[in-house]
Image (cartoon, grey):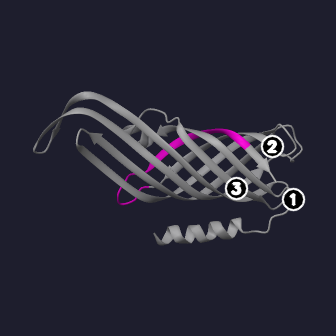
Amino acid sequence: MKSLRILSVILLVALGVEMSAQSNKTHLYYNMGFPMGNTKDFISKASFRGMGFEYQYLFNNNFALGGVLQWSTFYQDEPRQTYVKDNGAINGIKYKYINTVPLYITGTYYLASDDASIRPYVGLGVGTYWLEQRTDMGLFTDIYNSWHFGLIPKAGVLIPISYSTSIYLGVDYNIAFKNSDLDQQSWIGLSVGFDFDY
């Protein structure tokens, strides 16, 4: 919890930099997730339930510092069958979920000027992930939720459609490191949305 408070203070300081014309960006996007590693072992299906918001302050034409708040849900059900437990057995359909809320600070480097017809970028995010892993079966629920330290390398392109609006296309690799409650979780995210300059 202490690390979350520290991250929140850093994010607020980063976002509190004095604004000037055309030095701010906001990305609003729809996010898809493709599970990897331990995440794929628990839920193998892709997630099409996600959205995100990113604010960026540009220090110059190429480098931006910002913050991201994102949400994704992975879901999968398994056919009715009998599951043997230590002191009995349960018969039913198993519903599995992973809810993720990443909150992180980003550094982004734009590889072309803001008047280019396509503006590629690369970046890295550092922060925290709130994860909930849940299994429902009839009246029974197993649930684990916790905060994880995480990294998120990312890349993508902006395609301008007007003076202050661009189409936003991005790919990222989410890594939520292991803690005492859950193993490391990871997935590849694909994002489609809009970028607004102001």
The residue to which callout 2 is attached is 165
Mark closest to the chain's N terminus, 2 or 3: 3
**Residue 180: in magenta span:** yes
Indicate the secondary structure of the residue bearing disc 2. Answer: strand
Figure quadrant of residue 190: top right
In this rendered view, identify the residue nearer to me: 37 or 105.
105
Marks 1 and 3, how far apart at CA: 15 Å
Q: Amino acid at mark 2?
A: Thr
Question: What residue does disc 1 label?
Answer: 21
- Is residue 115 located in the magenta-colored stretch of the structure? no
Horizontal arrangement in the rendering, residue 63 relative to residue 31 (left or right): right
Could you tell me residue 170's position as x and y percent?
67, 41
Q: Nearer the viewer, residue 147 or 149?
A: 147
Q: Judge whether 55 appears above or below 10 on screen.
A: above
Determine the residue positioned at 83% across, 37% down: 161
Q: Amino acid at mark 1?
A: Ala
Task: State yes or no: discs 2 and 3 in contact (Cβ < 8 Å).
Answer: no
Q: Residues within 10 Å of mark 2 (few under 14, many from 20)?
A: some
| Viewer-nearest residue: 144 or 49 | 49
Disc 3 secondary structure class: strand
Q: Is the residue marked by circle 1 packed among few (<14), some (14-19), or many (20+) residues within 10 Å? A: few
Q: CA distance from mark 1 to mark 2?
A: 14 Å
Specify start and end residues of the magenta stretch as a single range.
178-194
Q: Position of residue 169 (x, y in %)?
A: 70, 38
Q: Callout 3: 10 Å neighbours few (<14), some, many (20+)? A: many
The residue shown at (84%, 59%) is: 60
The spot of residue 141 in percent (x, y) is 27, 46
Q: Is residue 126 above or below residue 75?
A: below
Q: Position of residue 19 (x, y in %)?
A: 80, 64
Q: Which residue is mark 3?
A: 55
